């Protein structure tokens, strides 16, 4: 049997480099609670991501929940809703529900798979308190359209940018500059990791300070808690991993880009009709991620959407028989989770179709070229 290929594998710095970084912890006995490594990583990330204020968290989920709790207005005694996408990881929906809001699901765009602003606008009503779109797979949402909606209805847009680390807009701005706040995930499976970790980027210092207090029990300088907080601070060990990984991020993204190029070359079979703007290749009836003109992508995921008779589930099973493990990111839709079944929502035919037919192929910086070819060829053999 050939060696197993998992959907992803974390990027790790050279062991000695991490050991050198955490040596500092043995010298100063500072393990957590906003230590010097956390501070160093925070400054480095603000620069790398091109954002003004970043607050670090133990994970992306806590970060998103904190941003929603502090930014979306929850009115006591009223129903409070947040419009969002069902085509995402459980975290987005749970962060909304966990903050005391009812998620209302809108459909997605068939090209980028991100929340469709027109569908969102049609659902806005007196109970709407915020919009939470997701830059799914690192594809940027239509941030200009959401900005207009935000201004028109005076409701904040809080982005789940878990997949968008390092992505830049066509204007050269960091993805995290859009909306009232953007959450990044630094989970082990992401392009950039701090083992577990996450962050919220916001424009103003005041909100950043509030978020920072929130993740430390709401405590301020005098020991008073002006709000109910939680404990979601990033540890020094996690920050050390981030500092090391950030040194290598350029090289990591380049390697991921090369892997994506190889997949695309093989999977489109040099199809002359392959349309980069939509990602559609007629040759094998597949759709890849589109190229978003002028943006700097991060090659976070390599999803393929299938059409025709073969179902994604069957393809995944056949690949597993070859020791290749793909993932159905994201199936089921979060709106189909048992815990969400009773939530009212409109029709989401695009999300239904994409979710039923998508598979994320293995992708990680150190994936060998031969393995990339093995995955692509095994897939072609199934769908041809
Ligand atoms: N919003 C969105 C849109 C997200 O996608 C996520 C997280 C969040 C919010 C929340 O952010 P965090 O709170 O997680 O920071 C994974 C991740 O756990 C999750 O972070 C991620 N999205 C989601 C898309 O994928 P699983 O259940 O698929 O992970 P798992 O453990 O099955 O790992 C996948 C593969 O990676 C394994 O086959 C082996 C490999 N792996 C994994 C880990 C953890 C390793 O080789 N080493 C490892 O340490 O959820």
Image: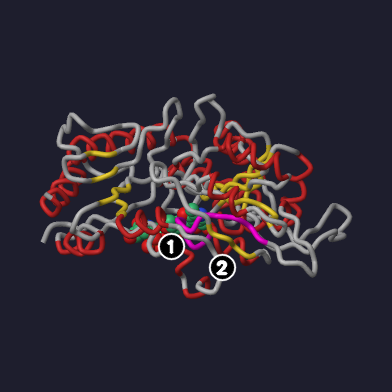
Q: Which mark is residue 25?
A: none
Residue 229: horizontal and vertical position, in percent? 75, 62
Q: Quadrant of ligand 1?
A: bottom left
Q: Position of residue 356 (x, y in %)?
A: 33, 60
Q: Residue at x 35, y 37 (%)?
A: 290
Image vertical order of residue 362 relative to residue 293, above or below: below
Image side of residue 358 versus residue 250, left or right: left
For the residue labelled by badge 1, is the local secondary structure a helix, a strand or a loop? loop
Q: What residue lies at 50% left-to-right and 46% top-to-bottom? A: 116
**Magenta residues, as a range?**
81-91
4 vs 106, nearest the viewer:
106
Q: Does residue 121 appear in the picture of this structure?
A: yes
Q: Of 211 and 104, which appears nearest the observer?
A: 104
Looking at marks 1 and 2 on the same chain, the residue that comes earlier in the sequence is marked by 1
Q: Residue at x 15, y 52 (%)?
A: 383
For the residue pair 325 and 341, the one nearer the viewer reads as: 341
Instruction: Assign the N terminus to one quadrant of the image.
Output: bottom left
Whole-number angstrom distance, CA of label 1 to CA of label 2: 14 Å
Per the rendering, the mark at residue 344 is 2
Query: What colouring method underlies this structural image?
Result: secondary structure
Q: Position of residue 131 (x, y in %)?
A: 62, 51
Count of all numbered marks drawn on residues in the image: 2
Q: Nearer the viewer, residue 304 or 109?
A: 109
Q: Residue placed at 50% from the left, 48% from the top? A: 115
Helix, strand or loop at label 2? It is loop
Characterize the local packing of mark 2: few (<14), some (14-19) or many (20 or more) Cα atoms within 10 angstroms. few
């Amino acid at each position: 049997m050939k060696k197993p290929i998992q959907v992803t594998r974390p990027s790790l710095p050279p062991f000695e480099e991490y050991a050198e970084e955490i040596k500092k912890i043995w010298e100063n006995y500072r393990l957590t609670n906003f230590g010097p490594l956390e501070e160093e990583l925070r400054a480095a990330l603000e620069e790398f991501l091109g954002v003004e204020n970043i607050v670090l968290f133990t994970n992306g989920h806590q970060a998103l929940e904190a941003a929603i709790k502090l930014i979306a207005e929850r009115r006591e005694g009223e129903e409070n809703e947040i419009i969002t996408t069902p085509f995402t990881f459980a975290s987005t929906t749970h962060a909304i529900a966990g903050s005391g809001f009812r998620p209302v699901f809108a459909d997605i765009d068939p090209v980028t798979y991100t929340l469709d602003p027109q569908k969102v606008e049609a659902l806005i009503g007196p109970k709407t308190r915020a919009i939470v779109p997701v830059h799914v797979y690192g594809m940027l949402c239509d941030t200009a359209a959401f900005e207009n909606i935000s201004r028109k209805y005076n409701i904040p847009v809080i982005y789940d940018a878990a997949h968008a680390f390092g992505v830049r807009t066509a204007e050269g701005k960091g993805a995290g500059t859009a909306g009232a706040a953007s959450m990044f995930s630094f989970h082990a499976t992401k392009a950039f990791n701090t083992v577990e970790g996450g962050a919220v980027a916001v424009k103003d210092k005041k909100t950043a300070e509030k978020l920072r207090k929130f993740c430390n029990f709401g405590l301020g300088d005098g020991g008073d808690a002006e709000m109910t907080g939680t404990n979601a601070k990033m540890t020094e060990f996690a920050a050390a991993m981030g500092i090391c990984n950030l040194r290598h991020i350029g090289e990591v993204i380049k390697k991921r880009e090369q892997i994506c190029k190889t997949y695309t070359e093989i999977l489109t079979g040099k199809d002359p009709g392959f349309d980069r703007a939509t990602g559609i290749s007629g040759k094998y009836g597949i759709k890849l991620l589109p190229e978003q003109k002028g943006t700097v992508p991060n090659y976070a995921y390599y999803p393929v959407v299938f059409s025709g008779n073969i179902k994604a589930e069957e393809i995944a099973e056949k690949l597993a028989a070859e020791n290749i493990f793909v993932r159905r990111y994201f199936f089921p839709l979060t709106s189909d989770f048992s815990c969400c079944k009773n939530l009212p929502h409109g029709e989401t035919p695009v999300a239904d179709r994409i979710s039923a037919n998508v598979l994320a192929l293995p992708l990680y910086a150190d994936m060998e070229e031969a393995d990339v070819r093995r995955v692509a060829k095994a897939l072609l053999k199934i769908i041809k």
